[in-house]
Amino acid sequence: MDRPRTLYDKVWDSHIVTVDGDGNAIVYIDLHLVHEVTSPQAFEGLRAAGRKVRCPSKTIAVPDHNVPTTPDRLLQIKDPEGRLQLEMLEKNCREFGVPYIPMNDARQGIVHIIGPELGLSQPGATIVCGDSHTSTHGALGALAFGIGTSEVEHVLATQTLAKKKDKNMRVIADDALPAGVSAKDLILAIIGKIGAAGGSGYVIEYYGRAFTELSMEGRMTVCNMSIEAGARAGLIAPDEKTFEYLKGRPHAPKAGAFEQAVAYWRTLRTDDGGVFDKEVVIKAADLVPYVTWGTSPEDALPITANVPDPNSFSDPAKQAAAKRSLDYMGLVAGTPLEQIKVDKVFVGSCTNGRIEDLRVVATLLKGRKVADGVGVLIVPGSGLVKRQAEAEGLDHIFIAAGAEWREPGCSMCLGMNPDMLKAGERCASTSNRNFEGRQGVGGRTHLVSPAMAAAAAITGRLTDVRKLA
Amino acid sequence: MEKFKALKAIAASLPLMNVDTDMIIPARFLKTIKRTGLGKSAFYVLRYDENGAKRPDFVLNNEIYRRAKILIAGANFGCGSSREHAPWSLADLGLRCVIAPSFGDIFYNNSFKNGILCIVLPQDQVDRLAALASSGNTAGGEFSVDLERQVITGPDGSVTPFSVDGTRRTNLLEGRDDIGLTLQHAGKITAFEEKQRREQPWQPAS
């Protein structure tokens, strides 16, 4: 009988072009997503070596990181460096024959939103992108991970990567999430438990009822933040929900081929006896909404907790990091997290910029007003998400509540387009990183779920959304 | 790729954990289409104050450590984003070797692609090397890093062995072109594509 295998083992094994005795493999890549920031040097490398893009049909490019989110972006992008990067992407795609979605196309959006949305990201596939949040696509049962620019060039030239296999890790959450607790809270709790390096060297499979009961969007939120636990990829076995999600999407297999694909996709699950090098169990039923207090995603606590005392950590390095974090965040140990006032609220990003996220926010904002003095930015993850939200009238709810409704892009997640925090500003953000300066120089980030972001928008401080519902 | 065989240089200590790639180079400096010239933006917030003046307490602003080619760092160094601008900026500063208890996976990988040797050692050994680097490290205080023998020799003569994955080591020692190596298997890649197309006809044609 065949050795029992994990889902990761299966996807890995099925993509090995060749492997040597030391485990150095050449792994085939089914889908390569390209954006403006991490690709120009890769195309330049191809040009210098006289190489071509091996499989343009398995490559797709879209600008997302540095695009402004105001409507005037179609007239002119003021920042000359950002403009040059966008022009280079278009030029490179034309020269190398790579499919390109321009900024004025309804399909434009954040790479990790549009991959699943267009049906490009499929179960059992290998997917890479010069962006660490490529782990998002693992929600469909794909092996998806971020790569650097040298590897972007490698994939463009060869449609493969040279790498060794990672180890297997499983995070098990067998019970359902309580009401008012979302996928974002679940992944923040996981990162809080295993730490920002807890998944380093592993591919994580998320396993159990808490994950299977999530919508596809919720699963994407979980897998998206795998990298914040150090894991390059996160996976959830595909199921009926996955197949239903993909059916009829523009790049999904067409009728006839679709059934054939599903028959294969059904085999993509961990066998009984599949071996994991590490297992972690999370009591999902005990979870409450989470927020971060510090400058690492591992600094996550229940909203009902207080800002921790740095001396409460046993590791001296963590004590020092926590002191630095509290200083940067302008927080005092012992302060109830619910008393922390915010200046800004950001809803969007590859973590929480999908239609379901916007619906949650709209449900809470409907008939309510944003607190005085709080600026609220709501940014759809793609043009298609924007169109859907507007068809449902969500934009009217946001605007009536006093929030801003923008064009799609990475926006205030990363501080490289005009949407940035000012020094000292504090933001409840649905994005993925609370690093120092991530949302702008001196900006202070508290990572939260969309529901918690809406709650903070209404009250002007970090708030347990369960009190508002 | 630039080769790395051995290095004799000053080491600077940056004992912070979770130094992420945004801290190594903030995103606003990624709006470039080049690999070079990023050193001026490396560790920007740690290096400069709000007015752009050098922070005297940052190690690489100290005259003694300005020529450092080795960085002794904290756990999970380079966590976060996949930006290769992080190792590009370190290389542009002249750093060729980072020693830490652990690294962010993507940063680790990107560094080797750019001729930067990342060495993983237990925390207590990193602490000991950091202490050596911080104790009156003058011209006589150089560290030697020998990738061929896989040893670090401290300014006090102490020898610390380390271990790097064999393939990464060979690639660095020989300065190999990864893409060229893979393209030697072009026939196998084509065969893989043909097989996949037969078994999974729903995949796009190559």
Image: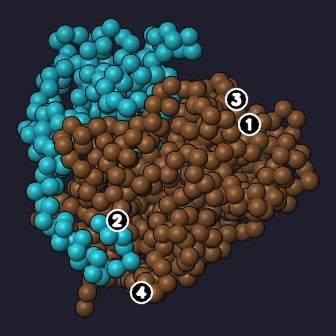
Instruction: Give the residue at x 17% y 12%.
Output: B140
Looking at this view, is A315 or A430 the one in front?
A430
Disc 4 + disc 3, Cβ < 8 Å: no
Query: Label 1: few (<14), some or many (≥20) within 10 Å?
Result: many
Specify the amino acid type for callout 2.
Answer: Asp
Q: Report which residue position mark 1 lands on.
A: A344
User: Same chain for marks 4 and 3?
Assistant: yes
Please say if A263 is above or below A453: below
Q: What element carries label 3?
A: loop
Lower sequence index among marks 4 and 3: 4
Q: In this view, does B150 lie above or below B202?
A: above
Instruction: Check disc 4 and report its element: helix, strand or loop.
Output: helix
Q: Which of marks 1 and 4 is nearer the N terminus?
A: 4
Q: How many numbered marks does the figure carry? A: 4
Q: Which residue matches tag 4?
A: A260
Mark 1 on the same chain as mark 2: yes
* Amino acid marked by disc 4: Gln
Residue drawn 16% across the image and 55% down it: B182
Label 1 with label 3: CB-CB less than 8 Å:
yes
Inter-mark Cα distance, 3 to 2: 42 Å
Query: Badge 2 is on which residue?
Result: A30
Q: Nearer the viewer, mark 1 or mark 2?
A: 2
Q: Residue A425 got which mark? A: 3
Q: Please give the chain letter of the residue carrying mark 3.
A: A
- The chain that hosts pointer 1 is A
